[in-house]
Every structure is written in structure tokens, then in C-alpha cells.
Amino acid sequence: MRSFALRWIGIGIVSLIVLVGFIPSWERALARRGWIADQYRFGDLYNMTNIARFKEHTFKETDQLDSTDLPAVKEAGVHLYTIGDSFTDIDTAFYPAEKNVHVWIGNGRQAIKLDSTKRNVLVIQIIERVLQERFRDHSWQLYATNALVDSSRIKPPAPKPTTWVGNLLNTRFGSDLNSRLEFMLFNNNIALKAKELKAGFMLDWFDRTAGARLSANKQHAFYDAETDTTQQLSSFRHIREQDIDAVVKHLNYVTDYYRKLGFQEIYLTLIPNKSTVLAPTLGVYNHQIERIERHPDLQPTVISTINTIRQHPDWYHLGDGHWNKQGRRYWLGIVNNLVRTPTCLMADRGTTTGLDKQTGRQ
């Protein structure tokens, strides 16, 4: 009888795990309550490598801004629009404009209607590794018609025909079942300890690591794509002048799109890869950012960050490929200063502004 009961208890537990894996909303609810561990709680590079020295136990505390970063006052008459990726995933409450709108690239476009009586400021942030991937061809539209669009020009999408079964499966159960099950089963502290032992053995005995590239002294980890010269995302891949020209051309397309939308102030910020700052000797650096920023045909006003960030390698997480709270504060200082700076001081097209390296102030 006992074995029979244990069998059914086991079946019940497995069924519950599979059911949670099928329903993303259940998984998110359990994760919010701490019943399912966050796979990125120690950093994404630690999650890839499982090397113990890259495990950031205080990752969340050192990643997000806090109440001390909130603006004391809002700037009346200024509407701020920011477009960026995971480096600028910042709550708009931290910006000091009267109105603050942010679009995370790839997460859908946002309809807007500019108020011509306001000062409309647009800041576009791009991480170095995606420049060749997204701006050598039509993918530049991610930062234009797939980011901010005039609300008066949007037509409601036509309904897509679907069966009730397909609709139920898509809306209720979602996708990536295998990944969710893996996170639930093998992302707890016990499983991570076993992964760390394996990763340490492979590194110490065979000088091998999975999912990332290490610096020469083994003290820093980077995405493979940032260091592999066969990939477009690499800081060390040879880039021809015509490739730089193509990127500049498409950045100008983005600028022209937003000027026609009504923006008069358009700023561009290129953020260097972690490997560019912490491991420039892993290969021959292609100097892509500098070559783009000084290109004579570049139209948007450049807010150059690379020289300042090079002086602060500690602004990047140890166990993650992104910058930490200090890097976010640097970005916040730059953007907030733009909001508080009169238009006439920032009106030159295609130039690098004279912002203070540390705070973003003039």
C-alpha cells in the first residue's frame, strides 16, 4: 500500500511540473513567489558557464537603480523618447522629462503622436555587437518603423484565422516547453553546485568552458559571439570600410525617418562590448565604434561613451555580459543631462557632444 501511495505521489508531482511547464503564466506566478528559481539570478554568463568564480550572489542588488536615482523634479515642456536594448532597460520613472517613453528593440513597436509645442528629444542606444548584424541591411527598420510610429498612420491588424484548438494551445500553453522544464528542474542550488563541479573540472583539467570565452587570466567571461572572429558580433572581426559606410548609411536612414516624424533632437549612443573594455588583447580590435562616430557622413548627434567606459571596467558585471548599476547611472546621467540642456546647445548634427566623462554634464 505504501509503495502504491508513493507511486501516485510521484505521478502527481511529475504531472504538476509538466502542467506548470505547459502554462507560462503559472510558471511566472510561482517564480514571483520564489518557488521557482530565476535562472539569471547570478548573471547570464554564470548561467552559461557555471564557473563558480563568476557567480554574483549580489547580482540583483548591484544591477538595478534605486530610489536615490529618481529625479527630484520633472522638466516641464520636455518629452523624452528612448530606444535601446537590454543595456537601457530602465524604468522611465528615473528620467526627468515631463513625459518619458521607452521602446525595447524587438519587443514591438509603439504608436506615438508628437506634441509640436513640446521639446521632443530622442536618444537611440545600440550595443556594439549588433551594429554589423542590424545596420548593414534592411534590419535597420528595427530601430525605425518597428520602434516608434505615428499613431495616425497605423491601421488595425486584420484578424488571423485560427481554429479554437490552435488558439487554445497558443494563448494558454505557449512555447519553449523543454526550456521551461529544464529551468524548473535543474536551476536549483543543488543542481547548480553539481554543474559548478563539472565546469570547474573541465576548466582546470582540460582548459575548456561551455558557452563563453574567458580572458587570458581566466578572471573574466564574455559571450562567444563577441570574441569569435567568424561572427559579425565580434569586436575582433575585420570590418571593411564599405561595411562601416553601410552602417552609417542605415543609421542616417533611421535619423531621417525620425526627423520626418517630427523629432528635431536625435542622439546616438554606441555602447562597447564587454570584451572591448575588459579584454582588448583577445584579438585585433576593429575599432568599429570610433570609425562610425568619426565618419564624416554620420547625421545623428553622437554621445560618445567608449573612452569613459574604458576607464571603468568595473561598470560591467562579473557574471553577466551587461553593465551593472554604475553603468546604468552613467547612462542615466547622460540622458538626464540632455533633457535639462537647452536645445540650442545640442543642435549640431553629426557631432560628438562635450559631455563630462563621468556624469554626462557639460
Image (cartoon, rainbow, N blue to C red):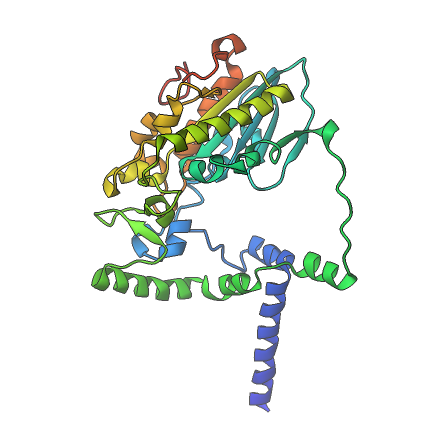
Say left or right for 240 vs 124.
left
- Is 114 rendered above or below residue 129? above
Say left or right for 131 vs 238.
right
The count of marks equals 0
- Report the quarter where the N terminus lies: bottom right
- Is 176 rendered above or below residue 146? below
| Residue 230 location (% of width, % of height) | 34, 47
Say left or right for 110 vs 361.
right
Q: Nearer the viewer, residue 296 or 330?
A: 296
Q: Is residue 170 visible?
A: yes
| Residue 162 location (% of width, % of height) | 76, 57
| Residue 17 location (% of width, % of height) | 58, 68
- Is 128 rendered above or below residue 159? above
- Report the quarter where the C terminus lies: top left
Extreme residue in the top direction: 344
Please identify the quarter of the rendering in which residue 195 is found. bottom left
| Residue 3 location (% of width, % of height) | 55, 89
Q: Is residue 74 visible?
A: no
Q: Nearer the viewer, residue 151 or 42?
A: 151
Extreme residue in the bottom direction: 1
Q: Residue at x 32, y 26 (%)?
A: 307
Please identify the quarter of the rendering in which residue 131 is found. top left
